Structures are given as structure tokens and as C-alpha cells.
Image (tube, rainbow, N blue to C red):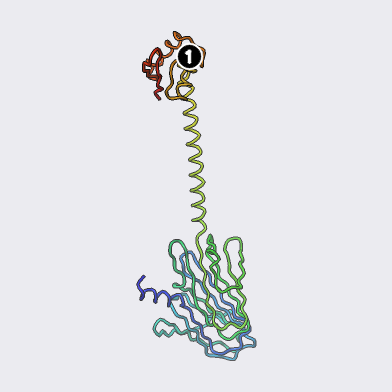
């Protein structure tokens, strides 16, 4: 990969930086909701230890975002956006008595895919807070890839449809969040393909065996019992002296000669004269 392009990707991975002016925050919650299209719905809520005085605040976002809104105790606030380079500075005023502040937006550059594996990565600098609750929801039908998750100390939850990674961090200063995930339907498709292949091979093997058995039965119907005995010995030996078969089966030379003549006409036996007997060759 081009080094310059790699640097750009790394910058995008660290695409979220947050700054809120010094406030007495008792609880800081952040949720990442990864969508099937690889966008991330992000929500940040701050609960204050005491109601705020009217305050002018700002929040910095680095990267490509959309659908941003800010609420104070459930009431939507007006805000202004100031862009400097790739950074957006969100400025707004929190009303007197605000207890909970929520900031929400959609990020478009936190997830990258390669070879069917998705990578989520972002860097956080939360404001000073005693407790930070962090959650990341995978898209429905996706699972964590090989437990590649950072930071440690997480808990894996599920609502029956989606997997959620959850952390509770005390007095966080700087947090690097990253994990990999994949679509479980790809595993299902692979397993299904393997099962279908095994079943197909088993069926073909059975049919071939059944066909051969049937053909053998049909083939043997055209011969007398004595002829089948001679054919069995010939098929097993490949080549053998006629005198040896006569002795093994107790056939007279005249009877054996008649049988060999019939098998020659059917193209199953060749003979070679050796002294007073024949060397017989089985033709498959």
C-alpha cells in the first residue's frame, strides 16, 4: 500500500477527538452503533454532578460526519459548526439547570473492510469524568473476529439479534477502541457448501456402486454356473494354465474346452498353446 495512503487511513482510524470545557461530569456514556453500510451512529451523553449554569460549550469532531444534533434534558439545541482542516468544532449553549447533555451524529470513516473482515478503530479523549460507560453494537448477523478487541476488560452482551461489547472505565483519560468483526452468513455458506459437497459425493458413490452391482448381475445372467466359476478364477488370476482350472474345478478337459470356446466367442478369454494345454488370459 502507498505510504501516503496508509497515513491517511491511520488518521481516519483516529477520527474522533472530543473536547468539552471543564465540567463536573459524574457519568459519561458513549455508544457506537455500527450499521450494515459501515457507517456508525454515535451517541454521547453526559450527566452532570450538579445542574449547569448557562454555559457556552464546544465539542470537536475529526472526520466525515452527518446528522448531528445536540439536546439538553431532551430539548434540541441550536449549534454552529466551524471547520478547521478536517476538524469540526460544534459550538452551542447549554441552558441554565441542564442536567444531561446528549450529542449524536453519524460517522462515515471509522470502519474499513478487507478480505471479508471489518475493522473498527477510533481514539477517544473524554472530558474529565469519574465513570465512562462505552458500548459498541455490531450489525445484525455479525460476530467478533478472533476476539481481536481493545481495550481489555469488556463484557460481551446480546439482545438475541445483535452482539454488544460493553466497557465501564473509571477516570479515563485517553482510550483507544478497536475490534474486528465479520458476517456470520459467510461461515454458514461455507459450512453449507461443505455439507452439500459431502452429500453429493456420498450419493454419487452409492449410485456408481449400485450401477456396477446391477451391471455385474446383468452380465452374469448370460452365463451358466460353470462358466461363471471359470470367469471368477480368470478375473482373479488374470492369466492361468487351463489345466490348473480343470484340476481346481474338477472339470474334464472336453468340458473345459467347450467353456473356453464360448468365452472366446464372447471376447472374454484369449488362449495360447503351451504343450498339451493352454495358457488362458482374461480380457476385462
Quadrant location of the C terminus in the rendered image: top left
Q: Position of residue 235 (x, y in %)?
A: 45, 24
Give above or below for 94 relative to 69: below
Q: Position of residue 168 (x, y in %)?
A: 62, 76
Q: How many marks?
A: 1
Quadrant location of the N terminus in the rendered image: bottom left
Is 105 or 60 nearer to us in this picture? 60
In-image side of 271 versus 188 (left or right):
left
Q: Position of residue 33 (x, y in %)?
A: 53, 70
The residue at the point 60 percent across, 79 percent down is 132
In-image side of 85 versus 19 (left or right):
left
The residue at the point 47 percent across, 63 percent down is 117
The quarter holding residue 87 reads bottom left
Give above or below for 228 relative to 209: above
Label 1 environment density (alpha carbons within 10 Å; few <14, some 14–19, many ≥20): some
Is 235 or 28 nearer to us in this picture? 235
The quarter holding residue 234 reads top left
Is 118 or 152 nearer to us in this picture? 152
Residue projecting furthest to the front? 275
From the image, tell me which residue sits under label 1: 246
**Callout 1 secondary element:** helix
Is 203 or 185 nearer to us in this picture? 203
Q: Position of residue 222 (x, y in %)?
A: 45, 16
Amino acid at each position: 500500500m502507498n505510504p501516503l495512503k496508509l497515513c491517511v487511513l491511520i488518521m481516519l482510524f483516529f477520527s474522533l477527538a472530543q473536547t468539552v470545557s471543564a465540567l463536573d461530569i459524574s457519568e459519561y456514556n458513549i455508544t457506537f452503533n455500527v450499521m450494515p453500510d459501515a457507517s456508525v451512529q454515535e451517541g454521547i451523553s453526559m450527566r452532570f454532578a450538579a445542574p449547569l449554569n448557562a454555559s457556552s460549550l464546544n465539542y470537536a469532531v475529526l472526520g466525515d460526519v452527518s446528522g448531528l444534533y445536540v439536546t439538553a434534558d431532551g430539548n434540541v439545541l441550536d449549534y454552529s459548526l466551524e471547520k478547521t482542516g478536517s476538524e469540526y468544532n460544534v459550538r452551542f449553549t447549554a441552558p441554565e439547570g441542564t442536567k444531561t447533555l446528549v450529542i449524536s451524529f453519524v460517522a462515515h470513516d471509522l470502519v474499513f473492510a478487507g478480505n471479508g473482515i471489518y475493522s473498527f478503530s477510533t481514539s477517544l479523549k473524554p472530558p474529565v469524568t469519574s465513570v465512562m460507560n462505552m458500548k459498541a453494537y455490531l450489525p445484525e448477523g455479525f460476530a467478533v473476529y478472533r476476539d481481536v478487541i481493545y481495550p481489555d476488560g469488556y463484557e460481551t452482551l446480546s439482545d438475541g439479534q445483535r452482539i454488544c461489547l460493553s466497557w465501564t472505565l473509571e477516570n479515563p483519560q485517553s482510550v483507544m477502541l478497536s475490534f474486528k468483526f465479520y458476517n456470520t452468513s459467510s461461515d454458514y455458506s461455507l459450512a453449507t457448501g461443505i455439507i452439500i459437497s459431502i452429500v453429493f459425493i456420498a450419493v454419487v458413490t452409492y449410485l456408481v456402486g449400485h450401477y456396477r452391482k446391477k451391471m455385474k448381475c446383468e452380465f452374469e445372467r448370460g452365463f451358466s454356473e460353470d462358466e461363471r466359476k471359470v470367469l471368477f478364477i480368470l478375473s482373479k488370476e488374470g492369466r492361468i494354465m487351463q489345466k490348473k482350472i480343470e484340476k481346481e474345478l474338477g472339470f474334464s478337459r472336453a468340458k473345459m474346452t467347450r467353456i473356453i470356446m464360448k468365452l472366446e466367442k464372447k471376447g472374454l478369454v484369449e488362449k495360447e498353446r503351451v504343450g498339451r494345454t493352454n495358457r488362458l488370459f482374461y480380457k476385462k
